[in-house]
């Protein structure tokens, strides 16, 4: 243990997972102090080795590959786990971490988990219980809360506008792109649903965060009711379903459809009983330059707005300029010609850098992160209520005991 007058040592992190999101996290750590990525476990050797190489090339290690989870958990150079594996493996991995820590085989003392915390509320509650029972510090990796625009915009609104005219009462959040990169996202039983499960967790939590007063607990706002709807706009059409099946064998969107559009309205109350609203929409059926995040916060005499596709930097490429496809300008890029927005620092703009900096700082100093597994459970509860609302066509009022065992329609087997 560090003495009272000296800083704690760097946090040594093991990644579980080596896919798209793990690469995003690794990139963001180039701007995070007092942290090392010392190990990577993934069941896919090529991805695992490539990520280890990238980490070491960026001098974020020294990092080594682990061929099995147990090897990573018992390593003497891992203090914390970043759980970045697919949704259907989260609970299994948490059980392994819990067992290794409780038995004394592992010295891991903290865990950060990507969204969503669980595919169902029951699953999310069990992930939380396992972390608590093992005595692990825990952080829920909801990057949009840490977006540079969200952090700066919220700070200005609550410091300058709220004292003069009153608290904000309406948050709007939208996130959309042309569809995920990996097959498991399109398989309801593995992912937990469709775009509602995959992306609404972002929009719900960033809306709640913007409406919560600085330094106030998220529990200071009470969700009273939700109304949700889903649609199958693009990917169940014959042409696009066949394209998906070709790209991702085993994905059968017409036989086992998952929604590619979702809408949500949340009604909340603050401590005084004032009504607040979060409006959100998410989509996998948007074809534009790339990933689009639109956020707004409205109050009595003010408004805050942000759009990720309206950056300060843009380029134009004529049809005479050709090249291979990629995502070198913006995430989920859909074109290589024309007027293109460029997100200069995606890891910062989307919140990954500040998110990881915050988690590292909290885990090193023994502080509670502003996003914990408790928040992950609450978000999962809201998403389950939205799925139930979409299924029944009714407003769902909270609390609702049925949500404890509810499974979204696209995630049901058989």
Image: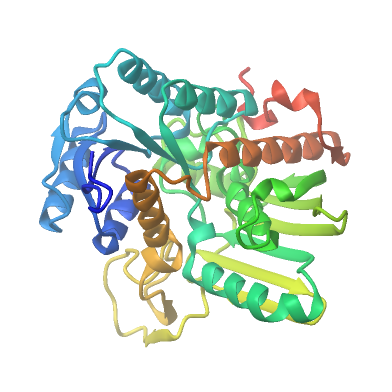
| Number of marks | 0
Q: Nearer the viewer, residue 278 or 176?
A: 278
Q: Residue at x 54, y 49 (%)?
A: 240
Identity of the residue furthest to the top in this view: 103
Residue 365 higher or lower than 16, as above or below: below
Q: Name the side, left or right, on which 283 lies relative to 15.
A: right
Quadrant location of the N terminus in the rendered image: top left
From the top left corner, tell me how far across and down residue 185 is, in percent: 49, 39
Q: Nearer the viewer, residue 160 or 150?
A: 160
Q: Residue at x 33, y 52 (%)?
A: 25
From the top left corner, tell me how far across and down residue 380 is, in percent: 63, 37
From the top left corner, tell me how far across and down residue 254 is, in percent: 61, 35
The answer to whether residue 232 shows anywhere in this view is: no
Q: Residue at x 42, y 35 (%)?
A: 137
Quadrant location of the C terminus in the rendered image: top right
Q: Nearer the viewer, residue 32 or 201?
A: 32
- Please name the colour scheme applied to the rendered image: rainbow
Residue 4 higher or lower than 90, as above or below: below
From the top left corner, tell me how far across and down residue 215 is, in percent: 60, 58
Report which quarter residue 13 is drawn in: top left
Report which quarter residue 49 is drawn in: top left
The answer to whether residue 150 shows anywhere in this view is: yes
């Amino acid at each position: 243990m560090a003495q009272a007058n000296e800083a704690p040592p760097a946090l040594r992190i093991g990644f579980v997972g080596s896919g798209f999101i793990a690469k995003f996290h690794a990139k963001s750590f180039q701007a995070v102090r007092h942290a090392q990525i010392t190990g990577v476990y993934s069941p896919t050797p090529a991805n695992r080795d490539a990520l280890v190489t990238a980490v070491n090339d960026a001098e974020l290690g020294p990092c080594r590959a682990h061929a099995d989870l147990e090897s990573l958990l018992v390593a003497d150079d891992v203090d914390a786990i970043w759980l970045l594996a697919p949704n259907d493996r989260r609970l299994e991995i948490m059980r392994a971490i819990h067992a290794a820590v409780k038995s004394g085989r592992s010295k891991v003392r903290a865990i950060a988990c990507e969204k969503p915390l669980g595919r169902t509320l029951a699953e999310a509650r069990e992930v939380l219980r396992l972390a608590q029972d093992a005595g692990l510090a825990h952080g829920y990796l909801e990057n949009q809360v840490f977006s540079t625009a969200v952090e700066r915009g919220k700070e200005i609104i609550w410091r300058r506008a709220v004292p003069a005219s009153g608290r904000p009462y309406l948050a709007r959040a939208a996130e959309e792109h042309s569809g995920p990169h990996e097959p498991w996202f399109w398989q309801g039983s593995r992912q937990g649903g469709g775009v509602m499960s995959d992306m609404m967790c972002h929009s719900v939590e960033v809306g709640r965060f913007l409406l919560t007063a600085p330094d106030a607990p998220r529990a200071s706002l009470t969700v009273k009711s939700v109304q949700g709807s889903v649609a199958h706009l693009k990917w169940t059409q014959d042409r696009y379903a066949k394209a998906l099946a070709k790209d991702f064998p085993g994905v059968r969107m017409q036989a086992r459809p998952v929604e590619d559009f979702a809408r949500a309205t949340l009604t909340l109350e603050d401590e005084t009983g004032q009504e607040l609203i979060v409006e959100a929409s998410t989509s996998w059926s948007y074809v534009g330059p790339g990933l689009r995040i639109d956020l707004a916060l409205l109050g009595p005499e003010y408004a805050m707005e942000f759009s990720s596709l309206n950056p300060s930097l843009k380029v134009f490429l004529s049809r005479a300029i050709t090249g291979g496809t990629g995502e070198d300008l913006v995430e989920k890029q859909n074109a290589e010609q024309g007027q293109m927005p460029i997100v200069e620092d995606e890891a910062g703009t989307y919140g990954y850098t500040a998110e990881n900096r915050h988690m590292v700082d909290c885990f090193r100093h023994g502080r509670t992160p502003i996003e914990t597994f408790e928040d992950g459970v609450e978000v999962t509860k809201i998403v389950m209520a939205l799925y139930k609302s979409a299924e029944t066509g009714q407003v769902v009022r909270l609390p609702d005991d049925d949500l404890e065992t509810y499974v979204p329609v696209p995630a049901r087997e058989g």
